[in-house]
Amino acid sequence: MTTMQLTRSDRNPQTAFYDKTLPAGIGWMHDLKKGQAFRIVDLSGNQAADTLLYDTKNPNDHYSAARTITEQKNLYLTTGSMLMAESGKPLVKLTADTVGRHDTLGGACSSQSNTVRYAHERAAMHNCRDTFMLELAKRGEGYAKRDLAPNINFFMNVPVTSEGGLSFADGISSPGAYVEMVAETDTTVLISNCPQLNNPCSGFNPTPIRLLIWNK
């Protein structure tokens, strides 16, 4: 369950046709064509990139944590993981990973979780669920609140305890670490670069990520 597959990519960032730095607390939504490669770089280390995936041609068919975990028989994501939609359709395959483990269970921070986990006065703090909804509203095209689903937390360390609970632990990512994936079908990616100041997974210091896309 905890096997890590560390794999570097031979793709050169200088040959990417898309290169964007996304500050902490900001959302991003982008379409990948089948066969395109997409890399998320943790520029400073210990950041959490909360991510959702959709079949571009059928957005109702979104990423499924349950399908993905069942398919790969592993709670965590790393090189070789196939990320699946609710229908069982493959969306993207992880082809490189210099961290070795990414969370599928912790979910996105929200106003409600800020209150329950930290303090009532933190309910108004910026959170990933609101960022997701803002990006979906900006996109339109039939996307709505109902299209939010349990997400992936790239770079986030959420060990499962011996009692079956979740532990939000210090991150295991490092500056410049990355995960890279290839689209198995036309896939829409939605990211909230987490603004969470209360969680050790980001070292209490949310930082930017870099997003790169190659045609092959």
Image: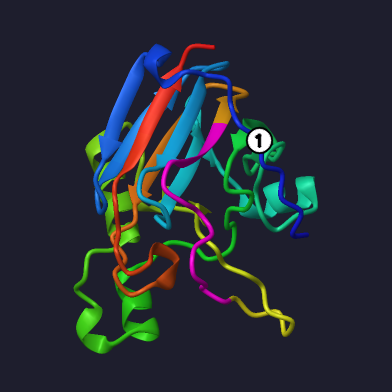
Q: Which quadrant is the N terminus positioned in?
A: bottom right
Residue 181 shows up from this direction? yes
Determine which residue is flagged by label 1: 7
Q: Residues within 10 Å of mark 1 (few under 14, many from 20)?
A: some
Tell me: residue 20, above or below residue 167: above
Tell me: residue 110, above or below residue 100: below
Q: Tell me, what colour scheme is on the image?
A: rainbow
| Image position of 61 (left or right of 21) | right
Asked whether 179 falls inside the magenta stretch, the response is yes
Q: Nearer the viewer, residue 92 or 147?
A: 92
Q: How many marks?
A: 1
Amino acid marked by disc 1: Thr
Asked whether 73 falls inside the magenta stretch, the response is no
Give the secondary structure at mark 1: loop
| Image position of 190 (left or right of 106) | left
Determine the residue positioned at 45% across, 31% down: 188
